[in-house]
Every structure is written in structure tokens, then in C-alpha cells.
Amino acid sequence: MSRVPALVISGPGTNRDHDVELALELAGASVQVVLADELIRRPAMLDEARLAVVAGGFSYADSLGAGRMLALDLAVGLGDRLSTFVEAGRPLIGICNGFQVLTRTGLLPGALGHNAHGRFECRWVVLDPVPNSVSVWTKGIDDTIHCPIAHGEGRYVHPDPEALAAAGQVALRYRSTNPNGSVADIAGVSDASGVVLGLMPHPENHIVPRQHPRHRRAGGGSQHLGLRLFDNGVEHAKEL
């Protein structure tokens, strides 16, 4: 079976692009990693992809706010092409800095602010997929996902989280301690269509069991892999 063409979008300072590349390859995609400025010069690359990821890291060293400069690059340089990509039903995910980018471009609701306690957080967390979520990325996942976080601006804010949840746009919640003060323990949100997902934790850093800090003890295991999100994204893209 042919592999799904996927694009990983990065910027200066991004450091999880190749982690995402491996996750997508394991899920069955053919992956190309591209810097935003190259993508702006060659926008047909986005048109040819059936799945895209805005990878995590610290693009532009979070200058002027996390994700702001990369979001400006994509919004100004690509115009409506990302929106057109989504309107075609092609799955798009933004992870950590990528989540910040997608909220700043208006492709996802809400915003990300500084962690409530004012400190950078680097730890493992446990996520609960929300049963009524419309997200294609979390479809059918009924067990927890374990993965690490690494952010200083991960506090998700939204003026009406109840309405967001009622619309099925809350995709993931923190089951473990809420590490950043996000409203209603929200760890990941979807757009109204379900094809766009943004989350602060890094599922690309738990794609094989040995990456879990407790993989030799109780609490680890393949049932908690973040890889399942990428499996879902690739499966959805195959149907397009």
C-alpha cells in the first residue's frame, strides 16, 4: 500500500521536527520536513501533502511570544492555503509550539498563556481522550495517553470552555496534575470539523514503549503510546 504524503513544518528553533517525522513514518506516512520559509517559496508542497504537522520546539526562540513569529510567517506567506488544506478535510496537527502557532493563525480556538505558576515545566503527563470529541486524531482511543511536556507558555485559555466541550472540540484533558493551569484541564482542542488538533504535550516522544520512564515497571506499556494519534491521522488521510 502506498504511503500517505505528509509534511512536517518547522522554523528556526524548532527541535521536535525529526521526532514527528519518525512518528509519522511508523504510522505509515512518507514524510518531508520543510522550513516555513522554503514552504512559502514552494507552496505547492502543501498542496501535494495529505497530512501536515506544525512541529514543536521554540521557533524564533519564542521571540515576541511563543509561536508568534512562525504564525506570522505562515499567515502572511501562505495566505489562505492552510485554511484551504483544512477545508479539503486534510488532517493538521500542531504540537506545543505548533499548537501556539495554530491558535495565533486562527485555525484553532482559544489561546496559550504563560504557565499559571510562572515556571517552565518538563515532566511526563497522563492524558484522557474525551469521548464525545469530533477529532479524527483521537477517534477510537479509549485508554490514556502518556507523554512528556516541555513548555513555559502552555496554559490554555478560552472564554467558554463548556460550549467548546459541548461542541466536541475538547479532544484531550489532563488526567494527571494539570501542569500549567489550563482551563477545565484542557490539554488538546480541535477545530469544529475535527481535522485540526492542537495539544501542548508531545505524543511524538512516546512512540515506542522503551521511551516511557516506567517501561520496565507497572504504568508503562504499548497501550499508552502517543503513536496512536499519528496512526489515526494517517488513516484519516488515506481515506481522502
Image: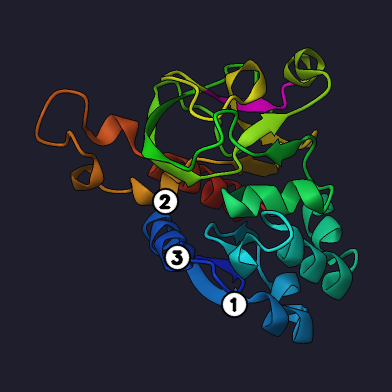
Q: Secondary structure at mark 2?
A: helix
Q: Earlier in the sequence, mark 2 or mark 1?
A: 1
Residue 85: where, in percent of width, then height? Answer: 78, 59
* Rendered location of residue 58, percent (x, y): 56, 61
**Residue 220 location, quadrant:** top left
Which amino acid, mark 3?
Glu
- Estimate how packed mark 1 is, as few (under 14), some (14 to 19) or many (20 or more) residues with alpha carbons within 10 Å: some
Kindly tell me whether residue 135 is visible in this rendering: no
Relative height, residue 215 to residue 239 (above, below): above
Q: Residue at x 33, y 45 (%)?
A: 206
Report the quarter where the N terminus lies. bottom left
Query: Marks 3 and 2, Cα distance to the nearest angstrom?
Result: 9 Å
Examine the rendered structure and indicate whether residue 214 appears above or below residue 18.
Answer: above
Q: Which mark is residue 204?
A: 2
Q: In front: 135, or 150?
A: 150
- Asked whether the residues under the numbered discs 2 and 1 touch, taking CB atoms below 8 Å apart as contact, a structural biologist would say no
What stretch of residues is rendered in magenta? Answer: 168-173
Per the image, label 3 sits on a secondary structure element best described as helix
| Label number found at residue 21 | 3
Dot 3: within a 10 Å radius of its alpha carbon, few (fewer than 14), some, or many (20 or more) residues? many
Which residue in the structure is indicated by mark 1? 34
Tell how many labels: 3
Res 183 visible: yes
Taking depth in this image into account, of 38 and 5 the one nearest to the observer is 38
**Could you tell me the amino acid type at mark 1?**
Val
